[in-house]
Image: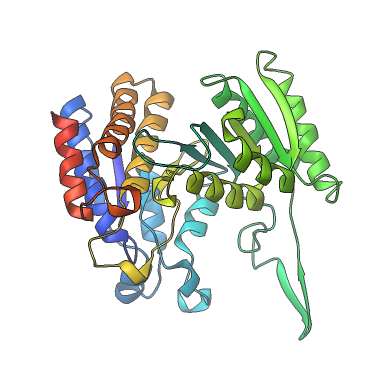
Amino acid sequence: MKIVVLPGDGIGPETMAVTVDVLEAVSRRFGLRLELDHDVTGHESLKRHGATVTQSLLQKVKAADGLMLGPTATYEFKDESKGEINPSKFFRKELDLYANIRPARTYPGLPNKVGAFDLVVVRENTEGFYADRNIASGGSEMLITKDVVVSLRRITRECCERIARSAFELAMTRGKHVSIVHKANVLRIGDGMFIDMCQAVAREFPEVRVDDFIVDAMMAHVVRAPERYDVIVTTNMFGDILSDLTAELSGSLGLGGSLNAGRDHAMGQAQHGSAPDIAGRDVANPFSLVLSAGQLLGWHGQRKGLPDFLRAAQAIEEATVAAIAAGDCTRDVGGKLGTAATGRAFVQRLLA
């Protein structure tokens, strides 16, 4: 498997260094023969190439089997005419990575306020209210007058159908329960279509239990009783917000793995941002990016029918559980180690 590795900005290089060590360790242990192709994006690419991402990099990624993208300073990239392109948006759009899979679970040894749970948010990734990616050219947020802004939301049957199918296929490997989250009481046409397509796909999976919730009520439900849920499927913006909430409920946003997957390509990406305020201080939690790498290996293994990749993905998950239980982790999740030391302990556990 060939993976393009892009460290990104802020804490990205630190957390990606740990992730690379983990990938190399599982490659040795399971005979994966991973080939890691290192390149740059974000501020480093802007400095070298005049753009945060380039067409040559896109072609390299398209020719690879997967992409690992570190956190990037997306909020600082405001003018695409000056090469300031949001790398995450760029790859999601150019590679049609329509499914954003974001697991959230609790870990033994890490205190939380809601009790044990294990769920996955399956978020549509290519349309909705995201003005920088829901039309072919330009943006769908417009300044009509100096006092009036109009933001357009795109919802299509195709995108609703394929994200629903991703959710139900995932549920068949887990607890066979899908919760549809929407705002159809207000967005009657768009979210009405979303519900209709989810229910249509549900008929192909009679073993799966299905329910639906209005998004604001769902926020309260997952805080009160997250253990009731298995796979949650929703539109782009709702999924973005809900998955950050569930990751934080697990103990830390730093434990939120994230896979962006399409038909032919996938990108592992930490759920959090570049955190420039702690960059270079050796305190950043690398587990979000490490878990995302595990998801990428699992996606490749499932797609290609390669059990060693599935075992490697499971080993990364199990090592994370063991590391947190033993306190071999950063302070935000109860440990006393720095970023680099957390990585070294993790690799030792993988290879033991």
Q: Residue at x 74, y 43 (%)?
A: 182
User: Residue 349 placed where, x, y %?
Assistant: 17, 33
Q: Residue at x 57, y 30 (%)?
A: 227
Q: Nearer the viewer, residue 283 or 195?
A: 283
Find residue 47 and report its image quarter: bottom left
Task: Answer yes or no: is residue 166 visible.
Answer: no
Q: Nearer the viewer, residue 341 or 274?
A: 341
Quarter of the N terminus within the rendering: top left
User: Residue 167 placed where, x, y %?
Assistant: 60, 30
Task: Answer yes or no: is residue 269 visible.
Answer: yes
Q: Nearer the viewer, residue 96 or 206?
A: 206
Q: Residue at x 85, y 51 (%)?
A: 186
Q: Residue at x 14, y 36 (%)?
A: 348
Which residue of the protein is positioned furthest toward the top in this rendering?
A: 207
Which residue of the protein is positioned furthest toward the bottom in this rendering?
A: 146
Q: Nearer the viewer, residue 109 or 241?
A: 109
